[in-house]
Image (spheres, rainbow, N blue to C red):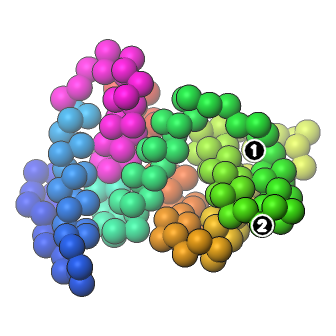
Amino acid sequence: MGRGGEIIPFARKSGGGLNELLNKAIILRKTVLNSNKDFLADVGAVEIIFEGRISEVLIDNRLIAESFFLCGIYISRMLRDFIYYCPRSWCAIDYLEEAVKTDNPFCAKNGADICFFLCSLFEGRTDRKRRTTSKQTYIEIGGMLYHRFFSETDSDIGFYMSQNFETMIDVTNEAFARIKGG
């Protein structure tokens, strides 16, 4: 697909699937490209900005798969939520321990979200000399926690995020560079 080209239909067993996601991505991309910087002041619009830029990066890099677009939607919502709340801990191991103790799969998801957030937005914080936990360790823990969430809930997004964790970090980094660059 070229920058101004048409969407190639992809078949799916039920619903529109990838076709609907691609159509949404094109609309979001146009919305973000036509928006101005004042748009960022509206917290409700922040999710749209995130999702639009992530969709743009996915399309530009030809990462055309339903799993990538669903991860992009999930990441946009997760990043929006981080605007509203501060996690009780920034240490992924705390969430892993809590998931084991409480048998609550959402603890694993929350820990995976922290790993993703740190790797995608605060990469420099994950590879500091004084820290024993490297970025690669956060990637491994995050992917494992998302997979644990999937295995305990059968949630597709847990599976997709576990499989695409590192790729989506790169996509999110590029999307944020585009947001900062205007």
Residue 174: image quadrant is: top left
> Height in image: 8 above or below 123?
below
**Towards the viewer: 123 or 40:** 40
Q: Secondary structure at mark 1?
A: helix
Q: Residue at x 10, y 51 (%)?
A: 4
Give the left or right position of residue 16, taking residue 147 as reference.
left
Q: Which residue is mark 2?
A: 103
Q: Residue at x 17, y 56 (%)?
A: 23
Residue 117: image quadrant is: top right
> Height in image: 109 above or below 174?
below
Whole-percent x, y for residue 116 in the image: 62, 50
Q: Residue at x 59, y 71 (%)?
A: 153
Q: Tell me which amino acid carries mark 2.
A: Asp
Whole-percent x, y for residue 54 in the image: 38, 47
Q: Which residue is farthest bottom? A: 13
Magenta segment includes 35: yes
Q: Which mark is residue 126?
A: 1
Whole-percent x, y for residue 29 in the image: 23, 43
Q: Which residues are magenta?
A: 34-57
Label 2 and label 1: CA atoms lie apart by 27 Å
| Dot 1 crowding, Cα within 10 Å, few <14, some 14–19, many 20+ | some
Q: Secondary structure at mark 2?
A: loop
Whole-percent x, y for residue 124 in the image: 71, 38
Say if residue 142 shows up in the picture: no
